[in-house]
Image: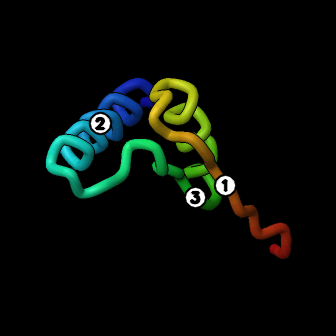
Amino acid sequence: MVTPFTTQVSQVLDHLVGTGRVDPQRIAAYSTSRGGFMAAHTMAADARIRAAAHWINTRL
């Protein structure tokens, strides 16, 4: 499940960078819950993602 997700995110970044919609030197990821797990793996797989933040709600 992680590999297809990271591949898809990289393809989206290819498109966004290729069309000039984003600055490739300023790409970051933000997520909550399981998305943080996915964001961390994507950041590890794609060096264009320079920063990541994860928020977890600890009040259940």
Q: How far apart are marks 3 and 1 (CA)?
A: 7 Å
* Rendering coords of residue 5 (x, y %): 38, 36
Kindly identify the residue that appears in the image at 61 percent across and 38 percent down: 40
In-front residue for pair 17/53: 17
Q: In this view, does 45 lie above or below 22?
A: above
In the picture of the structure, the residue carrying the numbered disc 3 is: 31
In the picture of the structure, the residue carrying the numbered disc 2 is: 8
Residue 13 as seen in the image, left or right of residue 35: left
Q: Nearer the viewer, mark 3 or mark 1?
A: 1
In the picture of the structure, the residue carrying the numbered disc 1 is: 53
Residue 29 as seen in the image, left or right of residue 5: right
Q: Is residue 30 above or below residue 60?
A: above
Callout 3 crowding tier (Cα within 10 Å): few <14, some 14–19, many ≥20: some
Q: Which of marks 2 and 1 is nearer the N terminus?
A: 2
* Rendering coords of residue 50 (x, y %): 56, 41
Contact (CB < 8 A) between labels 3 and 2?
A: no
As helix, strand or loop, the secondary structure at mark 3 comes to strand
The amino acid at mark 2 is Gln
Contact (CB < 8 A) between labels 3 and 1?
A: yes
Query: Residue 29 shows which numbered tag?
Result: none
Kindly identify the residue that appears in the image at 64 percent across and 57 percent down: 33
* Among the 4 quarters of the image, the one containing residue 53: bottom right
The amino acid at mark 1 is Ala
